[in-house]
Image: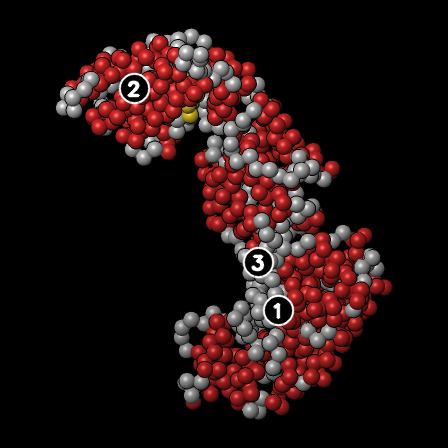
Amino acid sequence: MTDPTFHGDRPIQSEDEDRFGFAALADRIADSLTSQAVDKGFVFGLEGKWGSGKSSLLALVLKRLRGMEAAKVASVEFRPWLIGDRDQLLAALFEDLAKAIAGLEYASGDATGTTQIAAKSVAEQVKSFARHLGPVGKLAGVAGLFVPGASMVGDVIEKLAAAAAEQADGPTLVAQKEKLSEALLKLDCRIVVAIDDVDRLEPREVAELLRLVRSVADFPNVSYLLCYDARALVRAIETGTGVASGATYLEKIVQTEVAVPRPESFALRRWFSTELQSFASCLPERASFLQQVIDETGGRVLENPRAVVRVLDSLRVYWPSLKDRVDLADLVWLRMIAVGSPNFYRWVEDYLVSFVALTGGRAHVSEQERTAMAKEMDAALELDGLAWEKHQFEIERHLPGIQFQSFNKDKEERLFSGTRGATHLHAARDRRLASPSHARIYFTLIDPPDSVTDMDIADLLTAARDGVNPVAHLLLAMGEYKGDAGGTKAERLLDQLRYVEKDVVNGWPIETLIIGLANAADALASDARGDDWGYPRIYYLIRAVLRQLKDALPPSRFDPALKAMFETSPSLGFLSYLLRDETFGHGFYGDRPSPNDRLTTRDGFDAVRNVMIARFAAAGINTVMAESRATDMLYAWSQAGAREDVVQRVAEQSKDDAWLLRFLRKLYGPNSTLSLDGMSRFFDAPAAIVRRIYELLKADPDNTDAISIIRSLKANVRFDDGDFEEVLQAWEAREAGKTDDTGEEGRP
């Protein structure tokens, strides 16, 4: 394997680089251009699509011409696209012709010096003709004189001659050209002027160049080899000249045309594979997938040598930075898409950005957004000449969340399917484009701040073997790295851990790992956005990891480790989140138990709830209220079986109106409302407490705490208008025992 060498889309320079048999055709073209004399200029066309290898074939023709007898053959590479205006175009062409003839003079001397003298004379005549033609014609004056089918040379020269009559005394341009033509014919040397990329000139410049070649500079023994894409050149001719048929116009210019041979698709793909193997490596288990990409996507994209070179050079840019960090098959597919399907490539990048945000829990994709993105995909595919029906299996192999079987014809289901699952772990393990941790690196050349590698998991396990604190410190450090979607590296790591295969987990230091994860939870959640219930995303991820560990380990290992976590971890917010989850899951509170969604057995739950009740009691209610997750902690304390103790503590403190207001504000948050049922966890007579707050509000209408509390209560019962006094009296009546209805229940 060698270091990647950029091709840069340059034409080949020797037969050693000829992969498609161009050398034999180049020899025949060179022989045709020099084998016989011509009494007027001869124009030879080399036609092929952009990227087909015209410049490479031309380079081989020129190499063959330069290898011929220097005294008999001269070649000129004329580059009109480097010239500023039409006058300079004229001067530059004749200057190049003069240099070619001077070269013949240098190479062709004999004993008598006859050939040298003749060549020198011709070169001087060329220069003289150019000097006189320049100020007369300005080429702008010649524009419009040339009409295909007319006597081109005669018409132009006559007009030039008329203009020349106004110049200084001396031979007319017609006479000069006739004399120059006779001298070139007697010189008996061949001059070939090669002009590449004619079709890439501006339409006006194309018209001027063709007029120049066919009308002004058509000299004996001078041949022109024009390289162009016929379709592009025809359009330029029609735009630049206004003629109805650019093809007919071109036929009057070019006497003979040869098409560049189109390499077979198999040969192009074989060339690509050979070059790729010279600088990139593929894992054996992915080799067949890489070959499928080369055959399927490459068969569509690698349609000419230029496409091969562009994809290879793109890979030469990306591979040194991405080696051992991405999947080669995915990278090759993506770079082929970038070259061959640019609109779809841009859509792929947008889709992956959205998918990564979705899997990280930092975004939600509505049905409308899903439908809109699917329409954008279809539009991008159509712009690139592709279609979902033909390429859906190819897309599914490389992109995540693609579903090509629709189960609901009235619903868009092709995108963002399966945003969670063990497939993410496998994709991350193989560094696939479908991995949320690796997708961005395929586009940016650098690891996204939140990307996770195998080494990160190895570092976590190493930290766990060193103790609880190293685990927490490592996670906190990872929490400092945030990705484009706002998620952190710690979240991305935990997202992968929840899909680790069960047989792998058995060898992990679970006991320290569990406590270390919990110890970091509250600190990681300090500035995190919450889910729909207001809980930090990090809580959900750690709980998911714990469930994975529970399923993988025997109870004799997992249960003691979990109990130790509840006993020792300082993250009371996270522990309260888990405690409430288990309280509802076991049906200890509420009426919807979840047998399959619990971390603990019933005995285990009793053990951890007693641990947490003791920790809350030891801290005291004012300490709990000062915590950032006080709402969750207060409800967890009461709902876990300590209601009577909590009610007593609250009753003692709530004698103070200011304390009562602060406490009630802790019982609801931005994503929840305050209800009588919720208040009943802390008060024996919640309606009486509401009456007390309502009276405080009437006494002080500007009391912001009272305003917020009453507003939240109204929102809970959907009270929009009317007399709240009537609602409050109804609550008080129910509380007095006249009805069993206690109001709405909801988990804040």
Mark-to-mark CA distance, 2 and 1: 87 Å
Q: Nearer the viewer, mark 3 or mark 2?
A: 2
Q: Earlier in the sequence, mark 3 or mark 1?
A: 3
SS label for mark 2: helix
User: Is residue 511 visible in this depiction of the protein?
Assistant: yes
Q: Nearer the viewer, residue 640 or 488?
A: 488
Residue tagged 1: 525
Amino acid, disc 2:
Gln
Residues packed near mark 2 inside 10 Å, few (<14), some (14 to 19) or many (20 plus): many
Amino acid, disc 1:
Ala
- Residue drawn at x 39%, y 26% as measured from the top left: 78
User: Toward which corner of the image does residue 140 lie, by quadrant?
Assistant: top left
- Residue drawn at x 44%, y 78% as measured from the top left: 724
> With 565 as the anchor, is 32 left or right in this view?
left
Check contact, mark 3 vs mark 1: CB within 8 A.
no
Check the image and report above or below for 160 versus 607: above
SS label for mark 3: loop
Q: Nearer the viewer, mark 3 or mark 1?
A: 3
User: Toward which corner of the image does residue 594 lie, by quadrant?
Assistant: bottom right
Q: Position of residue 87 (x, y in %)?
A: 27, 30
Check the image and report above or below for 513 versus 85: below
- Residue drawn at x 66%, y 48% as measured from the top left: 325
User: Is residue 371 visible in this depiction of the protein?
Assistant: no
Residue 125's disc number: 2
Mark-to-mark CA distance, 3 and 2: 71 Å
Instruction: Indicate how the structure is coloured in the image.
Output: secondary structure
Q: Position of residue 318 (x, y in %)?
A: 59, 44
Q: Earlier in the sequence, mark 2 or mark 1?
A: 2
Amino acid, disc 3:
Gly
Residue tagged 3: 483
Q: Nearer the viewer, residue 232 or 664?
A: 232
